[in-house]
Amino acid sequence: MISWEDDPNTPRAKMSCGHAITPETLTTYCESLLSAGKYVFKCPYISPTGVYCGKEWSYLEVRRLAVLTLDEKKQFEIKISDNYLRKGMGIQECPKCHSMCERVDKKDKRVVCPLCSASDGVEFHFCWYCLHEWVGRRVDKCNNADCNGEDKRLKILRECKKKSIVGVSNCPAIRACLTCGMLIEHDRACKHMACICGQKFCFICLKPAVSGSYQCGTYNSPCVVAPVQTTIPGDN
């Protein structure tokens, strides 16, 4: 059973993976995934022994069991397709003409919109991160006042608080998933993490699980703290 402070007497829908969840919680959970830029819904259930379900739920299943309104269905479908373009294919929306633009190189911060460039007769450049027209001649840093030329998630990683995890002190409380780059905050219990994208890793040493097994021992085994991440996985 998946429960986020739900009334235990509230009726629950049984998902295809076998776990049950209330329609309201299902809607809230899926909305949070869409807000985080995801376009695939996976069961978040983690057993008392730390086993992550992670089975994918189809949108048709979510739409039916979450009892979405017509407006909610429309918004879900818009976000799913938009997130697929942005994250699944590495595409951003041009701030000028609103067409979708793809980076030639995933390391590029300065992007050219081919549609604006063709219609205006001069190349239109914008920043991949702040999504404003590019200012200045540099290709590695945008000179817009509200942009420092880096992914905003890096600032969160740098400035997050430190905490003790399974007796190991000075661990960053927030890490980026090793595969998709989604930020994950450690709440409580063990050091083993399972992202909704399916990637499993140790929150302390950042070593990925191999064939389902963690390289640094059991869920409560001390290991060496990995430094604060300075790049976003999946974006370099």
Image (cartoon, rainbow, N blue to C red):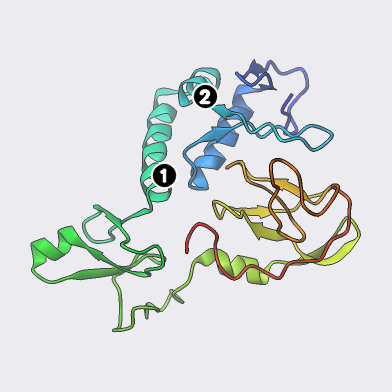
The residue sitting at 15% across, 65% down in the picture is 117
The residue sitting at 61% across, 27% down in the picture is 24
In the image: residue 195, left or right of residue 163: left
Q: Earlier in the sequence, mark 2 or mark 1?
A: 2
Q: How would you rate the neighbour count of disc 2 (Cα within 10 Å): few for under 14, some for 14-19, many for 20 or more?
A: some
**Does dot 1 land on a helix, a strand or a loop?**
helix
Q: Residue 40 in the image: state x and y as whole percent.
A: 50, 36
Check contact, mark 2 vs mark 1: CB within 8 A: no
Q: Which mark is residue 62?
A: 2
Where is mark 1, residue-wise? 83
Q: Quadrant of the N terminus?
A: top right
Distance from Cα at disc 2 to Cα at disc 1: 17 Å
In the image: residue 55, left or right of residue 52: left
The residue sitting at 51% across, 20% down in the picture is 61
Between 84 and 67, the one nearer to me in the picture? 84
Q: Quadrant of the rendered structure where residue 10 is?
A: top right
Q: How would you rate the neighbour count of disc 1 (Cα within 10 Å): few for under 14, some for 14-19, many for 20 or more?
A: many
> Which residue ends up furthest to the bottom in the rendered image?
137
Residue 97, compared with residue 17, is above or below; it is below
Q: Residue 217 in the image: state x and y as whole percent.
A: 84, 51
**Does dot 2 land on a helix, a strand or a loop?**
helix
Between 221 and 3, the one nearer to me in the picture? 221
Between 105 and 22, the one nearer to me in the picture? 105
Q: Residue 30 in the image: state x and y as whole percent.
A: 55, 34
Q: Amino acid at mark 1?
A: Asn
Q: Residue 50 in the image: state x and y as whole percent.
A: 80, 38
Between 192 and 210, the one nearer to me in the picture? 210
Residue 22, compared with residue 103, is above or below; it is above
